[in-house]
Amino acid sequence: MQTNNIPRPEYPRPNFRRESFQNLNGEWEFSFDDADAGIQEEWYKDKTLDRTITVPYVYQCEMSGIGERDFHNVVWYKKQTIIAKEEGRDRVILHFGAVDYQAMVWVNGCYIGEHSGGNTPFAMDITNAILFDKTNTITVRVKDDALDLELTRGKQYWKGESEGIFYTGSTGIWQTVWLEQVSFNALEKIWITPDVDRKTISIQMEFVGTCDKQARIQLSIKGHEYVDDLIHVHNNRAERTFRLDQAISLDWNHQESLVWTPENPVLFDLNFEVFVQNQVTDRVESYCALRKVSIVNGKFMLNNRPYYQKMLLDQGYWKPSLMTAPTDEDFIKDINACKAMGFNGVRKHQKAEDPRYLYHADRLGLLVWGEFAAAYVYSRKFACRMTSEWMDVIKRDYNHPCIVCWVPLNESWGVDCIMNNAEEQDFSRTMYYLTKSLDQTRCVISNDGWDHTVSDLLTIHDYEGSYSVLKERYSDIDRILQSTPGSRTLYAQGSRYQGEPIIVSEFGGIAYQKSSDEKGWGYTAAASEEDFVKRYRAVVSALLESPHVQGFVYTQICDVEQEINGLMTYEREFKVDPEIIKRINMQIEDSVCAKE
């Protein structure tokens, strides 16, 4: 594995890890194709592209080496690499973490295939097109129509300059590109489902290959082995439920508790080996956790205990690199910053975040709401696009214990007539039930913020800045249900409250300029650090004192472009001492913090 001078060199799929790994990040040839002439002129053959770009950063950001913000709907990439044959591995798989939006791929001038969807990974078998131990050329054409409002684009703006709540767009490759070599008989996919009540872990396995095989599964923690099982595999599928030692402790207060929480993010090591005629054909390393999410009598429960979610809205943008984290360490810094301020989770907003972030949230202990990128016009085309991509998100991220909630739709984006439109209401319900059909282990929200149809949680977006107004509004359940923050009703026509836990999933958004150079906006504004702390304590205290609110999502972790309503600057510098924020979140009295 080579890592020297390669950006983002770490293994990109940490919960399904193989020894074979060749990172293709770094310098690629690059060209804009504004005339869309590349296919006709066969740029995928011997043409040298006229620029260079640093992958996996998009051309719109400075870390790409280009930093141009103009729209270019078609771009081309080209990379030359030597692929050395690895013994015992018959197939070469080319992986893309994410490419926005439509990618076509050639290897050595041979067309391999294409993929649509800017948020999810895809892989292509390129075995028949490569030359081992010689130079191979990989060419990628990307089309991303900036004006197509039926695309799942999230916060990427379709106009020239960022404004309001929308940010600079991202075109092209924005997550790691890599190769792995795999046997014909290999493990393809695992679905890991823990059961805290029975102290079991169930594993569904999907394989590839043409013959019967065996699979060995080992489960351990800190060197203590709980499972070592050899199973026979037929028709490339197998499923086993492993009953753990019934003496293990799931008591949160027990020093040796093995239940996963943000306060105790304990992970089991999980290893797989595939055998054909007693020869190992594949090895995969993974991990899992004992963690349960449920709703009981209107209470959100984590591992059978009521759990108050204190979360931050996280857009997942960085100043020098936009939607791609500059380094893996930047994920860790953000997670540690959240925990330092007394938060136990994030709602990843309008973005299917890099699996490396989810890996660090798993091991460091942070709850995550997995949200999808919205489109802005409802149509059958949008419905088909989103449904396909959303299933890929769940397939990719199902095994991450940090994820406790799925959010396919937000604030009626893409379903802007949902209040009275039966078609859009049915789409919202479809996304809820489709998600449930793939994952029964997590909460699902039909339309975060307002105009809910069917949801496991009632989530409300409320940017009121007054303590007294919020205190009164959230003191009584009838007042809550009759409220219309943002002039929107909480339920779409024909739907009603049925006792779901109430989470204020966006609030605050207090603008505070740390320096005079920062220009931008927030939902309310603070004149000084002292004023900011006072305003923050007011809105947080009003929710914490409510007998009906079971969690909140403060807007937001950091400033993003023209938004200056973060608890940190865009460069990730704390605006106030994180200990002060933590004390407020924990409701520790502090003379610095008067409510109003």
Image (tube, grey):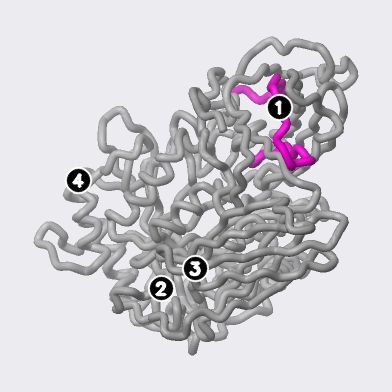
- Give the structural element (helix, strand or loop) at label 2: loop
Q: Give the CA distance from mark 3 to mark 2.
A: 8 Å
- Give the spatial CA distance, label 1 vs label 3: 36 Å
Q: How many marks?
A: 4
Q: Which residue is mark 2?
A: 258
- Across and down, in percent, residue 418 comes to 68, 65
Closer to the chain start, of discs 2 and 1, is 1
Mark 1 is surrounded, within 10 Å at the Cα level, by few (under 14), some (14 to 19) or many (20 or more) other residues, namely some
Res. 543 image quadrant: bottom left
Q: Nearer the viewer, residue 274 or 176?
A: 274
Q: Is residue 157 left or right of residue 211?
A: left
- Which residue lies under the disc numbered 4? 529
* Residue underneath mark 1: 83
Task: Check residue 93 for magenta coloring.
Answer: yes
Which sits in the foreground, 506 or 109? 109
Mark 3 is on which residue type?
A: Ala
Lower position in the chain sequence, tag 2 or tag 4: 2
Q: Earlier in the sequence, mark 1 or mark 3?
A: 1
Q: Nearer the viewer, mark 2 or mark 1?
A: 1
Q: Label 4 neighbourhood size at 10 Å, few (<14), some (14-19), many (20+)?
A: some
Magenta residues?
69-98
Residue at the disc numbered 3: 289
Reply above or below: 108 against 480. above
Task: Say what amino acid the circle numbered 1 marks.
Answer: Ile
Residue 245: where, in percent of width, then height?
A: 48, 81
Q: Position of residue 268 (x, y in %)?
A: 48, 65
